[in-house]
Image (cartoon, rainbow, N blue to C red):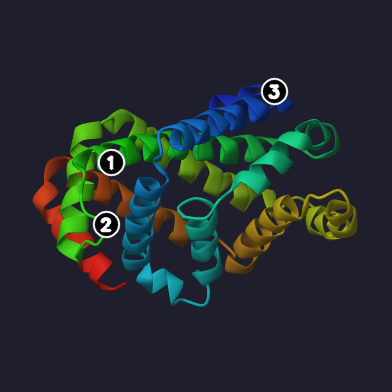
């Protein structure tokens, strides 16, 4: 499967490196340290909960569709989820050099792109959490207040170009993953890595590699799924930036489903 021309990154013209992977993960660590030092943990958890609920509402049809459910869950868990990714990221950093040496360029590029998405998401979420904390809202909030608070934080942060870049990076990574599943023998190689990965303390990394591979492999062609992500997330960005009242109503409906 060929990547759409608009989504081919500069990394296609140069070999991806372990240094690039480690640099993105260092950015993630820096943002996590900021969150800890400023006491933003609760605010960040709230922001991410709102985002997860919105994602579940936006992709309810794909989550219920046997063909696309696994890939949608993978995106929700690995890109938009609210869980702690510290262990997985530490494992990525530890074996960056080995991945560069032992795996095809496509796999290394995928790892770098995943780390890039993760770093940018962590930065933007950190900014949202700081804005949320500054609102000084009470802990117990109804759906409407949660939604309005989120929309207000979004308007305060702005950064529309970075939001578009975030979406582009997610799509680029998705198309790359769809391409990687076609590498001959890669699934067998991943399966053979299970015991060594477990023995080396790399189980979290092994899980994300296998789950991503299997999710996209089981889906077959990724066109419908990734086109839906592109269209729906683009519409969502436009709504948040251009018609915040409408975005607030959508967010409130999503939170009410909790």
Q: Does the image show residue 6? A: no
Residue 99's place in the image compared with 17, above or below, is: below
At x 28%, y 30%, the residue is 159
Whichever of callouts 1 and 2 sits on the residue coming sooner in the sequence is 1
Q: CA distance from mark 3 to mark 2?
A: 41 Å
Q: Quadrant of residue 111?
A: top right
At x 26%, y 50%, the residue is 236
SS at mark 2 in the image = loop
Residue mark closest to the camera, 1 vs 3: 1
Numbered disc total: 3
Decide if residue 1 is on the left or right side of residue 160. right
147 vs 69, nearest the viewer: 147
Whichever of callouts 1 and 3 sits on the residue coming sooner in the sequence is 3
Give the residue pinned by disc 1. 133
Whichever of callouts 3 and 2 sits on the residue coming sooner in the sequence is 3
Give the residue pinned by disc 2. 139
Q: Does the image show residue 189? A: yes
Image coordinates of residue 66 in percent, x first then y, are 52, 77
Give the residue pinned by disc 3. 19
Q: Residues within 10 Å of mark 1 (few under 14, many from 20)?
A: some
Decide if residue 18 is on the left or right side of residue 140. right
31 vs 4, nearest the viewer: 31
Q: CA distance from mark 1 to mark 2?
A: 11 Å
At x 71%, y 58%, the residue is 207
SS at mark 1 in the image = helix
Residue 201's place in the image compared with 38, above or below, is: below
Q: Are marks 3 and 2 in contact (CB under 8 Å)?
A: no
């Amino acid at each position: 499967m060929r990547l759409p021309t608009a989504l081919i990154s500069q990394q296609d013209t140069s070999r991806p490196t372990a240094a690039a992977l480690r640099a993105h993960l260092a950015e993630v660590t820096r943002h996590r340290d900021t969150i800890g030092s400023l006491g933003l943990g609760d605010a960040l958890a709230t922001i991410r909960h709102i985002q997860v609920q919105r994602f579940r509402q936006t992709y309810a049809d794909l989550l219920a569709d046997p063909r696309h459910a696994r890939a949608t869950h993978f995106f929700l868990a690995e890109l938009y989820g609210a869980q702690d990714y510290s262990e997985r990221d530490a494992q990525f950093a530890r074996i960056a050099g080995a991945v560069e040496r032992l795996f095809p360029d496509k796999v290394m590029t995928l790892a770098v792109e995943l780390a890039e998405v993760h770093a940018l998401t962590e930065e933007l979420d950190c900014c949202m959490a700081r804005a949320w904390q500054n609102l000084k809202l009470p802990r117990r909030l109804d759906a409407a207040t949660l939604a309005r608070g989120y929309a207000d934080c979004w308007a305060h942060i702005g950064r529309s170009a970075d939001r578009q870049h975030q979406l582009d990076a997610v799509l680029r990574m998705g198309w790359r993953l769809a391409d990687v599943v076609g590498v001959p023998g890669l699934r067998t190689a991943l399966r053979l890595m299970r015991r060594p990965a477990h023995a080396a303390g790399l189980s979290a990394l092994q899980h994300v590699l296998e789950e991503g591979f299997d999710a996209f492999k089981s889906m077959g062609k990724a066109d419908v799924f990734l086109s839906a992500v592109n269209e729906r997330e683009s519409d969502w960005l436009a709504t948040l930036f251009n018609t915040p009242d409408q975005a607030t109503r959508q967010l409130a409906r999503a939170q009410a489903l909790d």
